[in-house]
Amino acid sequence: MSQTDSFIEEVTEEVRRDRLFTLIKKWGWVAVLAVLLIVGGAAYNEYRKATVKAEAEAFGDTLLAGIDADDAGATLGKIEAANPQQAAIAGHLAAADALAGDNAEFGIQQLDTVIGTEGAPAVYTELAQLKRALALPPETPLEERRAAFEALAVPGAPFQPLAEEQLALIAAETGDTDTAVEILRGVLASAKITPGLQRRASELIVALGGELASAQ
């Protein structure tokens, strides 16, 4: 390599270094910021995961304490929830505890609270509606009971088969056995039917004098 070529290479390399240095001075902060954002984002995600886990564990401990209190839902009904889902879960447990403790009024009140919880998952609110209808006292007018279950028996509703089972029982209670059997046959044809419900519906059809074979 001649001295001229060597000199040209050295000059070219210096120019490259100068350009790189200029670029670093001008845009280096962008690279630094990108690194900080990536590292900071990862750190925040880890912090958020740890926070969510801690909140869930604390909520679970509070629920267990409320259940252990065995005070007909009084303690469970006072739990402070961090979000609508937690509020719905606590409300369901408080209602179950109250109903088991023969405090139907407080149990229904807790279910009403769940139903009215804005932002709660639909499955929780609709389950609360079903449990509320089941918890209505015996003196509740028949039409009111029927209306409560009819609202839950619409096609596509998550608890449609269970609501229809109750409508069949109401029909049987009023002596309308034909309607009861017809409803139960519809229940047996449902894709959502569980083994337990299938057994109950079949037994009730037979008890009402219906033909079980025609329902299958």
Image (cartoon, rainbow, N blue to C red):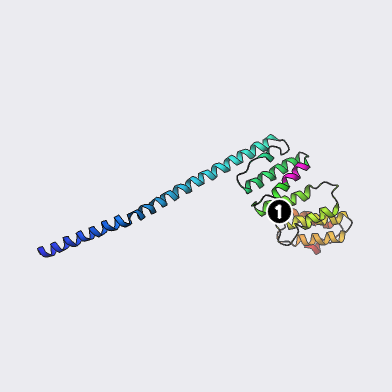
Query: What residue is rendered at 83% in x and 58% in y?
Result: 205
Residue 5 location (% of width, % of height): 13, 65
For image coordinates 65% across by 53% down, the residue present is 121
Residue at far front of view = 26
User: Is disc 1 surrounded by few (<14), some (14 to 19) or many (20+) residues within 10 Å?
Assistant: some
Q: Looking at the rendering, in which quadrant would you find the C terminus?
A: bottom right
Q: Callout 1, which amino acid? A: Glu
What kind of secondary structure does the magenta stretch mostly adopt?
A: helix
24 or 188: nearer the viewer = 24
Going by the image, does 109 lie left or right of 50? right
Q: Looking at the image, which is closer to me, 10 or 46?
A: 10
Location of residue 114 with respect to 154 vertically, above or below: above
Magenta stretch: includes residue 183 = no
Look at 23% across and 60% down and name the residue there: 16
Task: Tell me residue 97's x, y (percent).
Answer: 72, 40
Specify the farthest residue to the right.
175
Q: Secondary structure at mark 1?
A: helix
Compared with residue 43, is residue 160 higher up or lower down, i.e. above or below?
Answer: below
**Up-down: is 108 above or below 156?**
above
Q: Nearer the viewer, residue 165 or 154?
A: 154
Work out which residue is located at the far left of the displayed protein and give it: 3
Magenta stretch bounds: 105-110
| Residue 106 among those drawn in magenta | yes
